[in-house]
Image (tube, grey):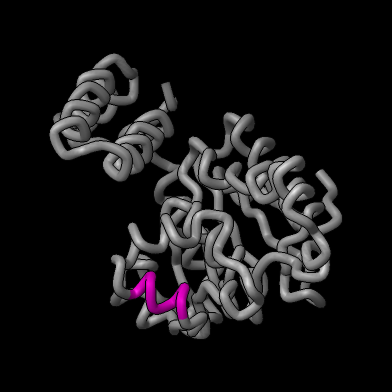
């Protein structure tokens, strides 16, 4: 499909989505968010795609929501159109594994979109932050909630109340990103990680994603119960039979994603 603010392509079983508003440092406007939801929907419905990578440019993953677009909005405008909610959460609702490949600025809405992905691979030039307080508002796309869950209360309070930015290395030490790589190899290593996920059983990957996400919503005993039931359910898949048969016979498995 052709988009105004995105570039999309398939690399084997990986769906690659690139935010493409370079002059605006990929600021997240209404068109981009709508197109991002459509692109995710397209890859989710494609049975030949097993994982997604969301990325931006080398200068910016996304420098935030488009301030020019929302500066004149009133409370009633935001409330009636359910501003931010519509379309924004589609990244978090993606059932297939989706990772963020972040270089440059990931600020405000950009940091929030990255946190909606299952994990973040950061380039060594990446900068993360929630600077909304500097423009007279607060994070509105999950920044106070997902950030606190990722890095803890103290650092979340620090970033949201001061508006300061943290480097990729600090973000990794805090648990916000899973790894830091040179900016020159960010896309290659991110697609490689997605390929490793996509080459395995898709239903099992989806179950794993669902279990980990569930752990943030329920207490430990309920989370363990949920995990156990999906573990039991995995034995109804053909891929479980294939994977264990391949292991016992010392051969490579052939996944049918069923």
Quick one: 33 or 4, which is closer to the camera? 33
The range drawn in magenta is 155-161
Q: Which residue is found at the position 60% from the left and 42% from the top? A: 90
Residue drawn at 26 percent across, 37 percent down: 218
Taking 165 as reference, is 106 above or below it?
A: above
Choose top left, top right, bottom left or bottom right for residue 170.
bottom left
Q: Main secondary structure of the magenta part?
A: helix
Q: Nearer the viewer, residue 232 or 176?
A: 176
Across and down, in percent, residue 95 comes to 49, 35
> Residue 129's spot in the image, x, y percent?
51, 75
Quadrant in the picture for the C terminus: top left
Which quarter of the figure has residue 13? top right
Work out whether residue 107 or residue 101 is closer to the camera in this orientation and state it.
Answer: 107
Q: Is 204 situated above or below 64?
A: above
Residue drawn at x 49%, y 61% is 143
Magenta span includes 103: no
Q: Position of residue 222 (x, y in %)?
A: 19, 30
Residue 243 is at least partly visible in this image: yes
**Residue 182 visible in this rendered orientation of the protein:** no
Q: Identify the image quadrant of the N terminus.
A: top right
Q: Is residue 17 left or right of residue 194?
A: right
Reply above or below: 108 against 31: below
* Left or right of residue 48, residue 159 in this image: left
Relative to 73, is 83 on the left or the right? left
What percent of the width, then of the height, locates residue 24? 78, 74
> Is residue 87 rendered to the left or right of residue 250?
right
Residue at point 41%, 51% (across, down): 196
**156 in magenta:** yes
């Amino acid at each position: 499909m052709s988009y105004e603010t995105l570039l999309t392509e398939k690399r084997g079983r990986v769906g690659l989505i690139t935010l493409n508003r370079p002059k605006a440092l990929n600021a997240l406007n209404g068109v981009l968010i709508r197109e991002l939801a459509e692109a995710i929907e397209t890859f989710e419905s494609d049975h030949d795609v097993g994982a997604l990578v969301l990325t931006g440019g080398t200068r910016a993953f996304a420098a935030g929501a488009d301030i020019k677009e929302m500066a004149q909005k009133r409370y009633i405008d935001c409330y009636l159109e359910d501003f931010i909610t519509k379309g924004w959460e589609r990244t978090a609702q993606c059932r297939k594994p989706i990772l963020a490949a972040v270089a440059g600025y990931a600020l405000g809405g950009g940091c929030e979109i990255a946190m909606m992905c299952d994990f973040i691979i950061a380039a060594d030039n990446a900068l993360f932050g929630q600077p909304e307080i500097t423009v007279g508002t607060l994070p509105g796309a999950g920044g106070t909630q997902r950030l606190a869950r990722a890095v803890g209360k103290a650092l979340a309070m620090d970033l949201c109340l001061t508006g300061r930015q943290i480097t990729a290395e600090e973000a990794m030490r805090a648990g916000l990103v899973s790894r830091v790589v040179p900016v020159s190899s960010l896309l290659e290593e991110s697609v490689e990680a997605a390929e490793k996920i996509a080459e395995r059983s898709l239903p099992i990957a989806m179950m794993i994603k669902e279990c980990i996400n569930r752990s943030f919503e329920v207490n430990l005993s309920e989370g363990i119960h949920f995990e156990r039931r999906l573990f039991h359910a995995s034995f109804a898949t053909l891929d479980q039979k294939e994977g264990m048969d391949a292991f016992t016979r010392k051969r490579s498995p052939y996944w049918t994603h069923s």
